[in-house]
Amino acid sequence: MLTRIDHIGIACRDLDAAVEFYRRTYGFTDVHTEVNEEQGVREAMIKINDAGDGGATYLQLLEPIRDDSPIAKFLAKNGEGVHHIAFGTDGDVQEEADGIAAKGIRVLYDSPRRGSMGSRITFLHPKDCGGVLTELVQAAKPAGH
Amino acid sequence: MLTRIDHIGIACRDLDAAVEFYRRTYGFTDVHTEVNEEQGVREAMIKINDAGDGGATYLQLLEPIRDDSPIAKFLAKNGEGVHHIAFGTDGDVQEEADGIAAKGIRVLYDSPRRGSMGSRITFLHPKDCGGVLTELVQAAKPAGH
Ligand SMILES: [Co+2]
Ligand SMILES: [Co+2]
């Protein structure tokens, strides 16, 4: 079951500047930074609040580390801004995706890939989701545990 | 202080179809619908999870009710998709906005307007916020009470 909004993914050109913007403007200081080579990004997860399911809700700032990464292509086409939204599941993300695929929604990965902080993730096709690129997240540490 | 992601605002052409998409695809059934004449929208707040500050996090689906509403213009330019993000404050939204304005961020309203479910809201200029149209929300029922 999807039990929370896990994060909002935001494309940016300069990760350090974006992290500093959110710190200075709003006082958000709980930041985890990592590189995801497979996704072609350097990213920062800014924790905004705990969620009632035992997980949390984040902003995910994404800076491309190579020109052929999806985020680089998004920036070239759209400029900086919201790239995707992500729901957190309390179960297995592949089972969640299979159930959604059975309703006719296209799932973009054959099997889950590595997301932020050791999570397992997959994506749904934005054309099947009202124009919203939608990610499903299974946190490394299950919600509520 | 901003204590939660209050909602993600999503522009859609057919509100009933969008609500049904989120119900059928993900099982989200906690839906509040209202019309906001001033904003020129019919909208649905779909509650996804409680937030740790006593508030909650929602999807906000927005359908234009007239051609000159900001959401109608967004749809004409971009099609359906994410329109804005919103942070919830535990204090007075105008004080929150004044503090942010003092840091050089443009606030779009001179004074707060009525948002979903009796909230008071204002918006920050997306060009000052990394391409993200950003709303501040003071819930009618204060978080934690
Ligand atoms: Co993401
Ligand atoms: Co809103």
Image (cartoon, coloured by chain):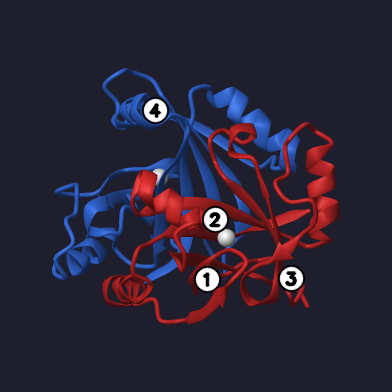
Chain colours: A blue, B red
The chain containing the residue under callout 2 comes to A
Which residue is denoted by mark 2 in the rendering? A57
Q: Is residue A100 left or right of residue B32?
A: left
Tell me the SS state at disc 2: strand
Disc 3 from disc 2: Cα separation: 16 Å
- State the image quarter where residue A136 is shown: bottom left
Secondary structure at badge 3 equals: loop
Q: Are marks 1 and 3 in contact (CB under 8 Å)?
A: no
Chain of the residue on which disc 4 is drawn: A
Q: Are marks 1 and 3 on the same chain?
A: yes
Mark 3 vs mark 2: in front: 3
- The residue identified by callout 3 is B143
Q: According to the image, label 4 marks what residue?
A: A75
Q: Which amino acid type corresponds to the residue marked 3 in the rendered image?
A: Ala
Circles 1, 2 touching at the beta carbon (< 8 Å): yes
State the SS at label 1: strand
Q: Secondary structure at mark 4?
A: helix
